[in-house]
Amino acid sequence: MNSGSPRMTLFRAVRTLTLLMFCLLIGAIVAPTFAAEIPSTSIDRSSFVSIGGIDQWISIKGEDRNNPVLLVVHGGPGESQWPEAEKYVLWEKKFTVVLWDQRGAGHTYGRYGAKTPDFTLDRIARDGVEVAEYLCRTLGKKKIIVLGHSWGTIVATEMVQLRPELFAAYVGTGQVASWNATVNMQYDLALDKARKDGDTVAVKQLEATGRPDPNDPKQAFSVNIWPAMAPTDQAWIRGLRAQVPKLKAKYPKDFQDFQEGFKFSVQHALPYQMNVDLPKTASKVGTAFFIIQGQDDVITPTQAAVDYFNEVAAPKKELILIPNAGHFAFMTAPHVFLGILINKVRPVAIERGG
């Protein structure tokens, strides 16, 4: 047969088309399998890790492991963040977010209960350093970001004092300065609010009892700061109380551990809180230092946080006050707070090795 005949030309064309379709079909079958074998860059892991000689609960979640790691050091004391995990979902787009139930709190308390050993500020801060080391090893990082809230700012500040080279940035919100400053400013804020509201009963009561002695916790806690608190904080606290029945029903054991751990931590942490004076003990910070504070925080008064910020010497520091927000600004002004983390903290942390 003539190789150049129309019949042979047609045969070759059909064969070529068949081979092409076969390759496309195989490609369509193989391509998804190949894509499925590409390692995911996301992470979603919750487990107990041996930290400080005991098992401590750590959750690691993020959409891209290349993002900076952000360790949340919860407040309270004992206010484990696992019930609020969904609030951090948006954070997970730009950060690998780590929630850690501290010694004596949440799931970690559930392992040991009232027999939890070595509940001291120094031990918890050293636990935090071990958590940071674990995260660097596990996630292949040189440094991480640490974010402390309220009591967590005391712990996180001490962590940075112990091992500044582990942290690309420190972020404080609901920033503690000193116990004395907190007690005195809370009294002034409560009295000022009562006078502005024309609440003569509250004014007379506050003036009659006088300024509380910071060395007497009963006096310190006798001041009613609720009326002076930011409306957003009041709404947040009401919301927390309202979700208790649902959490109890859905997670009976875990929520019982949360509640009992909260009580345990508050009781055992009080002596350490009363001795805190960060302007004296942590005026030098060996990493980037950020305070993101609700402008109307009464629980850890904003003016005390500002005064502390002004005392700090750090390679870089920045203070951002969020209007119409208080102690729980990271929860009640979530988009503003996250925007600050992304636009202010993240670039600095990356530049500093995070």
Image: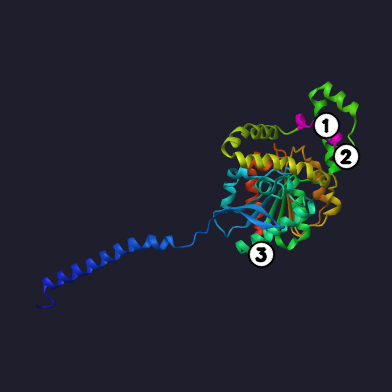
Q: Which residues are magenta?
A: 217-228
Which secondary structure is most common in the magenta stretch?
Answer: helix
Residue found 76% across the figure and 42% down from its top = 266
Q: Residue furthest front?
A: 115
Q: Which element type, helix, strand or loop, lies under badge 2?
A: loop
Q: Image check: 262 left or right of 218?
A: left
Could you tell me residue 264's position as x and y percent? 74, 42
Tell me: 205 left or right of 96: right
211 vs 305: above or below: above
1 or 3: tag closer to the N-terminus? 3
Residue at the image point whose x is 76% and y is 60% from the top: 315
| Label 3, residues with CA under 10 Å away: few <14, some 14-19, many ≥20 | some
Q: Mark 1 touching mark 3, by CB under 8 A?
A: no
Q: Is residue 257 above or below residue 62?
A: above
Q: Amino acid at mark 2?
A: Pro
Q: Would you name the residue on which mark 3 appears? A: 142
Inspect the magenta stretch and tell me whether residue 223 lies in it.
yes
Q: Which residue is mark 2?
A: 214
Tell me which label, 2 or 1, sits earlier in the chain: 2
